[in-house]
Image (cartoon, rainbow, N blue to C red):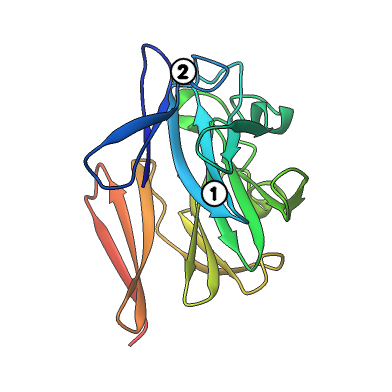
């Protein structure tokens, strides 16, 4: 069992345990950069464990992706958000689907005064060589953030979009995507999730002015 730890003083850490009682550090000091204070969004793909590493202030440096095959020896497979820097790749989310590894990189929050160019979705078969899937933001630069879900064999991407409304996209092959749902726009939206419930789906959105909203799809 692995857990990523935020450590603002010394850099993010990864801890692991076999029994839930005795824990040991698997990675320290943000790997090779103590400014990488956040380690999270782990996924297993082809016998490797992947982690995202990012900074709290990412104006200069984008997200890193680290991986390990044994929990002791780590390597970096993505550096500086593919070279596009912190404002355009401040954080990321990982997901495995149909034998491939997917990574969505997030823009900085446009409420901080930095215009968004749109999230970017990346695909890799081996975790080393990556290609971009579709356009940035799937054609809308206001889609500055994305989260990835696999539910009953269907691949979903949930965006955060303050000005046009958060969106749900879906795909059955990871390459071709269709817009599935658009929520009412709100500049006070701070995140959303998609969940499997019985035979349907529930979309839950957190909004500072409207409160929590839940939308249901299905019977």
User: In the displayed structure, does residue 201 sit left or right of residue 159?
Assistant: left
Alpha carbon distance from label 1 to label 2: 21 Å
Q: Nearer the viewer, residue 213 or 47?
A: 47
* Quarter that holds the C terminus: bottom left
Q: Identify which residue is drawn at 32% across, 68% down.
A: 215
Mark 1: few/some/many CA within 10 Å (<14, 14-19, 20+): many
* Callout 1–callout 2 Cβ contact below 8 Å: no
Q: Identify which residue is drawn at 30% across, 81% down.
A: 198
Circle 2 sits on which residue? Answer: 29
Residue 36 percent across, percent down from the top left: 50, 21
Residue extending furthest bottom?
Answer: 219
Q: Identify which residue is drawn at 62% across, 42% down.
A: 118
Residue 174 percent across, percent down from the top left: 66, 65
Can residue 92 be spotted in the picture?
no
- Residue 89 sits in quarter: top right
Q: Is residue 45 above or below residue 203?
A: above
Q: Identify which residue is drawn at 42% across, 52% down.
A: 185
Circle 1 sits on which residue? Answer: 94
Q: Nearer the viewer, residue 64 or 189?
A: 64
Q: Is residue 179 above or below residue 9?
A: below
Can residue 199 be spotted in the picture?
yes
Residue 216 percent across, percent down from the top left: 32, 74
């Amino acid at each position: 069992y692995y857990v990523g730890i935020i450590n603002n003083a010394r850099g993010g850490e990864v801890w692991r345990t076999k029994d839930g009682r005795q824990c040991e550090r698997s990675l320290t000091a943000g790997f090779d950069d103590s400014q990488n204070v956040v380690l999270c969004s782990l996924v297993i793909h082809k016998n490797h464990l992947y982690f995202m590493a990012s900074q709290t202030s990412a104006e200069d440096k984008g997200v890193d992706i680290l991986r390990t095959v044994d929990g002791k020896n780590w390597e970096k497979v993505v550096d500086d958000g593919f070279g596009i820097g912190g404002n355009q790749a401040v954080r990321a989310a990982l997901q495995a689907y149909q034998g491939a590894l997917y990574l969505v990189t997030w823009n900085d929050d446009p409420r901080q005064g930095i215009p968004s160019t749109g999230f970017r979705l990346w695909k890799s078969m081996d975790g080393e060589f990556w290609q971009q899937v579709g356009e940035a933001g799937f054609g809308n630069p206001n889609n500055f953030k994305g989260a990835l879900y696999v539910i009953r064999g269907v691949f979903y991407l949930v965006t955060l979009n303050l000005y046009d409304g958060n969106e749900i996209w879906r795909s059955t092959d990871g390459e071709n995507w269709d817009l599935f749902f658009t929520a009412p726009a709100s500049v006070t939206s701070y995140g959303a999730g998609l969940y499997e419930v019985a035979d349907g789906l529930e979309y839950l959105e957190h909004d500072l002015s409207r409160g929590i909203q839940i939308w249901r799809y299905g019977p």
